Amino acid sequence: MADKKTRKASTKKDEPAKIEVVLFKSDTCAFCPRAEEVVRRTIEDFGSDVFTLKVINVSENPEAAEEFGIFALPTVMIGGMSVTGIPEPDMLMKMVLGAKVMTNKKVVSK
């Protein structure tokens, strides 16, 4: 019985960490809907097991923008890197690859 529990625990540990994509937007931002569309289209090809998308509406939660040092909208953050404005899919992919490399380095160093 102990072996089964150990195997389950190690399986969870070996699973790749999801990359968190954070989109900061507001209700009054003219460019935010397009930015959200680009982000969603870019990451949906990978499936929900690769990414988590967190959308923060600063109209409802202005403290979140202050906490992360966001001064312009829309802003997308991936792995500590951010881009403001409507992101190009190529730029998002570069940010994703950078975040993936950093995630792998953290896992290896543990």
Image (cartoon, grey):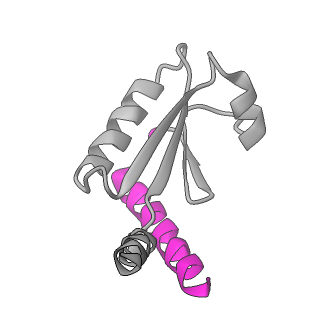
Q: Is residue 69 magenta?
A: no
Q: Is residue 72 above or below residue 47?
A: above
The one of 4 and 36 positioned closer to us in this rendering: 4
Which quarter of the picture shows residue 25?
top right
Instruction: Place residue 34 in its image quadrant.
Output: top left
Residue 105 in sight in this render: yes
In the picture, measured across the screen, residue 104 lies left or right of residue 50, that is right
Residue 30 in percent (x, y) is at: 48, 19
- Outermost residue toward the front in this view: 1
Q: Nearer the viewer, residue 104 or 81?
A: 104
Viewer-closest of 73 and 21? 21
Q: Residue furthest bottom?
A: 109
Percent x, y of residue 37: 33, 34
Left/right placement of residue 34 relative to residue 109 reads: left
The quarter of the image holding the N terminus is: bottom left
Horizontal side, residue 37 vs residue 58: left or right: left
98 inside magenta stretch: yes
